[in-house]
Structures are given as structure tokens and as C-alpha cells.
Amino acid sequence: MNDAVRHAHVTGWGRYAPAQVLTNADLERMVDTSDEWIRSRTGIRERRVAAAHETTASMAAVAGLRAIRTAGIEPEDIDLILLGTLTPDYWMPSTAALVKEAIGNTKAAAFDVMAACSGFVYGFATAQAYIQAGLAKHVLVIGAELLTRFLDYTDRSTCILFGDGAGAVVLSASDEPGGALGVELTTEPRGAYMIWLPAGGSKSPPSPETIARGEHYVRMEGKETYRFATKTLASTALESIRRSGLQPEDIDLFIPHQANIRIIEAVAKGLDLPMEKMFVNLDKYGNTSAASVPIALAEAVNEGHVKVGDNVVIVAFGAGFTSGAVTINWTADPARGIAGDAAVRPEDVSVRLPVDWDSVDPIPDALAELMARPGGVEVPDDVVPGEPERAHSEVHA
Ligand code: ACO
């Protein structure tokens, strides 16, 4: 390889969605809300809920292995693993370290990236920099979240928004032009307490008092976050496009963070682009934070929305406030993704547990009660647990 010019190409992609579906109708039975309110204010119809045996690491490992299979390489070929998450399995070790072992890799450096919903894009940009600097050949970048264990199911303003899942890409070094182009990352600490989780850190270690006050749950100022998101998603995407030497009209598809359909519509309007250029799947998954962009990217490619030569922008915003965008000139054969997904069954992937230690039941009580009720949370008949579900168009047919 020419040492002077290294390009970072997306060679693999994969996703994993837990099988259990939590619909708006289910939420109507938990909090004072309605399917109509949730759909009209957010665009969300349903979201996925991880089963008790699943963790952020287990979901990440399945999505990561699928991306590795799509790339046609072996787990041992990966020399760096970056995992964006705000819901790690433990405070330490990193979830990336658990994933490294679960996928059967012995040589990679592995660490978590904490930039909330922008975590995957921050990880992607970091991977790109490692590759361009000649420090890595194949990097596995994952976004994985298990948010349903950090939600207050009495707070209708947050519990309706979020869901669980994981997505991943492999970025590989090449001297062929194309691949990841211009990057823009921003951090705006004025928004530090607009989306946050108050207790459990060193400022407020967990205690009976913090738990009684519900400080171990996600809190959010929705309106302020909405304002930030609409403005910043557009400006961050534009800067990434500009740094790539392109114009917005040169972009074939945007993969925006899937938080709210109204935010995505506002971004399309701000960029003067039709909604057909915005990939949307939040109706099926809700906001999966750092997992949202890689799940959407893998789904967009597997459903035929991306072809070789297309310019694709991944763009996210999140707590911090953070935002990030990367413009990608797509070079991989889109057909590879479906085979990559099929090659990895979730039941074949396991994360090693600690010796002599059991977690308490991890599912929040309100959710556990709902899931136990007849007619509650569903596992669709035609979905093997953990398999990527029906194609987008079939879901709401
Ligand atoms: N069902 C019914 N009514 C509701 C619900 C609900 N689930 N939630 C709020 N309401 C009520 C409110 O109480 C309020 O009632 P009031 O007028 O009587 O006071 C009314 O609906 C309007 O509430 P708003 O908060 O003004 O509703 P808004 O249109 O702003 O929508 C929403 C709220 C969906 C949260 C929106 O602000 C939003 O999407 N914000 C961005 C959130 C986001 O993207 N977060 C992810 C950040 S990424 C990360 O890092 C985790």
C-alpha cells in the first residue's frame, strides 16, 4: 500500500434488533399517552426491547460479527474496536473489551466512545483518522444501546422515545480513492444538562436516596433538545459535505440520527432537499441513540437504497450536546450485507460472565409487568429472535 495516501472504506455492515416489540398501544397501558400523540409528535410506532439475557455487549457482538462477515474478513483481522454507547454493560471494563472477546479477536485495541447519540459517528471519525494515519488496517465501529433499562416508565415524555439495538461497520484501509471523506464533529456543553442521567457517576454515586429520586433514569428537556437538533444536524452535515468538496445536491442519501421524524423533516427543509433523500426507520425502532445511525445505514444498504458510487452522509446529534457527520463515497457491493447478516445467529454469540456473580433482574418493574401480561409486548411469529426483521416496506403494509 502507498504510505502517503490511505483511504478508509466501509467494507462491512451489520445490525441486530432484539425480537420483542413494544408498541405505542403497549405504552398506552403504562402511561397517559396515545398512539396518535406518539405518531404525530415523533413518528415512532414501535421499538425493540432486549430480553433479560441480552446486554449491550451481546447485541454489539452480533452486529459486529455480521459486519465482519459482510466485509469477508475474519474477526482476527480487526486491529481496533470502537464502541459508541451510553448504556455500557458495566462502568468498567469497557463494553468494547467484552465484545472483543465475544467475537473471538485477540489482537485489537478496544475502547468505548461516550458521545451519547453521536457516539457511533464519533467512533467512525476516529476509525477513519486511525486508518488515514496508518495506525490500523481494519477497524470495527459499533453503536449499541440498551436504553429500556434506563427509562422511567412513569415519565411519558421520555419512555415513549427510546429502544434497544446495535449496528456496526468495518472500515478498511485502501489506496483506492473514495470511502470516508469530510468529517465534522461538534460539542456544545451549554446543553450538558438538557439530556442527562444524574446519578451513578462520581458526582452522585448510587445510593438508596438517588434511586428513590429516580436519578438513575434518563432525563431530557425535549424542546431545547429539539431546537438544538434541527439547527445542528443541518449545519454539521453541511460542513462535512463542504469538507468533502461536494454540494448538498451531490448527496444521494442522508442517514440521520433517528430521534424524531419532525427533526428529520426540518433538516430536509433546511437543506432544501426532498424527504426521499432522508432515510427513515424510526417508526420501527424509536431512538436507539448511538445504535440508530449504524442500524439505519445497514438497513438502507440491505434494502437497496445505496449503490456503488453514491455519496452518503451519516449525521447525528446527542447529549453533550454533541453532533457529528461524515460524508462517505460508497464503494462496497451492497448485496454483501444480507449474506453477512444471515451468517451470524445471535444464539451462537456469547459474552463471558463474571465468576460467582449474578445480576439482579435487569428489566424495569413496569416493563417486566407489561411483558408478562397476555397481549403485552410481542415477539412476532415470523421473526427468529434476534434476526433482522421483515423488509421496511412489509412492516406496515
Ligand atoms: N403523550 C401525551 N402527551 C405528552 C407526552 C406523551 N408521551 N409527552 C408529553 N406530552 C404532553 C406534554 O405534557 C405537553 O402537555 P401540556 O401542553 O399540557 O403541557 C404536550 O404534550 C406538549 O409537550 P411538548 O414537550 O411541548 O411536546 P413536543 O412537541 O416538544 O414533543 C418531544 C416532545 C417528542 C420529546 C420533542 O420535544 C422531541 O422530540 N425533542 C427532541 C428529543 C430528542 O431528540 N432526544 C434525543 C436526544 S439524543 C440522546 O443523546 C439521548
Image (cartoon, grey):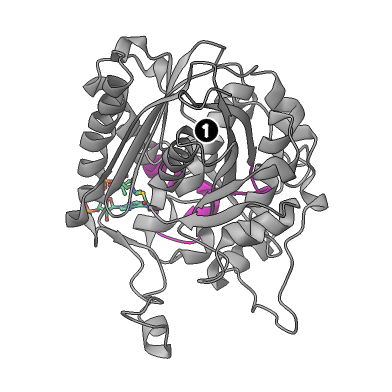
On the image, numbered disc 1 is attached to which residue? 296
Does 305 sit above or below residue 207? Answer: above
Using the rendered view, name the quadrant where residue 215 is placed: bottom left
> Residue 17: within the magenta?
yes
348 relative position to 135: left or right? right
**Magenta part of the chain:** 16-39
Picture residue at 34% right of the left edge, 56% below the top: 157
- Residue 11 placed where, x, y %? 62, 27
Picture residue at 46% right of the left edge, 51% below the top: 162
Q: Quadrant of the C terminus?
A: top right
Residue that lies at the very extreme toward the front in this rendered image: 3
Q: Quadrant of the N terminus?
A: top right
- Residue 306 placed where, x, y %? 54, 16
Residue that lies at the very extreme toward the left in this rendered image: 190
As shown in the figure, which amino acid type bears the numbered disc 1? Answer: Ala
70 relative position to 192: left or right? right
